[in-house]
Amino acid sequence: MLKTLLILPLLFAPACSGPASTEATPSGVQELGIPNLVAVDARLFSSGQPSPAHLAALSAGGVQHVIQLRPATETGSGWEEQRTAELGLGFTRIPIAGNDDMTEENARRLDRALAEAQAEGGRVLLSCASGNRCGGLLALRAFYCQGATPKDALALGKRAGMTRTEPAVRRLLGLTEE
């Protein structure tokens, strides 16, 4: 735990200002053990499924809200509401079961949830099982809600963890397969 707390200042140093960072995750973050954790920008992190201990470390480091994209019925999920409440964190669940849920409507739901969470101050963790759904939905949010070009939105999604959702996201962005 002490090692985790010593690394938190590195994790939560501002990565950039503005809508999206092109910088890698701050050094030392891998030692926290959070799967596929990426600093999307200074106030938003994307990751795979955090553990209860990860949430405590993130809370100590300034994360004030968690947005979970896994449906509560998905194996290994459904406990996050209770843990975030115990830690005094805000929590939002937007159930994204797979590619069929990669939609403009869900991108707009994410945009609203992020706006509400960030209005409270602090940092936000967006998570799913691996970071894949996070990256895909962030790409769609960048395109539909922030005016990013399709190529820039796709690049953001890849930096934020998109892998298997890429074909569905490409279709929605109007991009042909490479």
Image (cartoon, grey):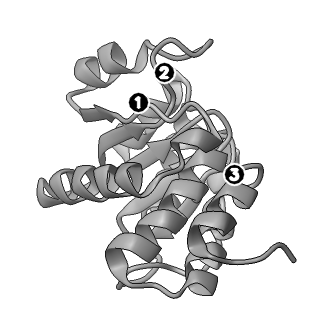
Q: Earlier in the sequence, mark 1 or mark 3?
A: 1
Frontmost of labels 3 and 2 is 3
Q: Residue at x 48, y 23 (%)?
A: 71
Q: Quadrant of the N terminus?
A: top right
Q: Circle 3 is placed at which residue position?
A: 165
Which label sits on residue 56? Answer: 1
Q: Nearer the viewer, residue 115 or 171?
A: 171
Q: Position of residue 170 (x, y in %)?
A: 68, 68
Q: Nearer the viewer, residue 134 or 54?
A: 134
Which label sits on residue 52? Answer: 2
Q: Earlier in the sequence, mark 3 or mark 2?
A: 2
Q: Residue at x 62, y 12 (%)?
A: 75
Q: Residue at x 24, y 21 (%)?
A: 85
**Can you tell which quarter of the image residue 80 is in?**
top left
Q: Secondary structure at mark 2?
A: helix
Circle 1/circle 2 CB separation < 8 Å: yes
Does 31 sit left or right of 57 as displayed? Answer: right
At label 3, the amino acid type is: Thr
Q: Position of residue 171 (x, y in %)?
A: 66, 65
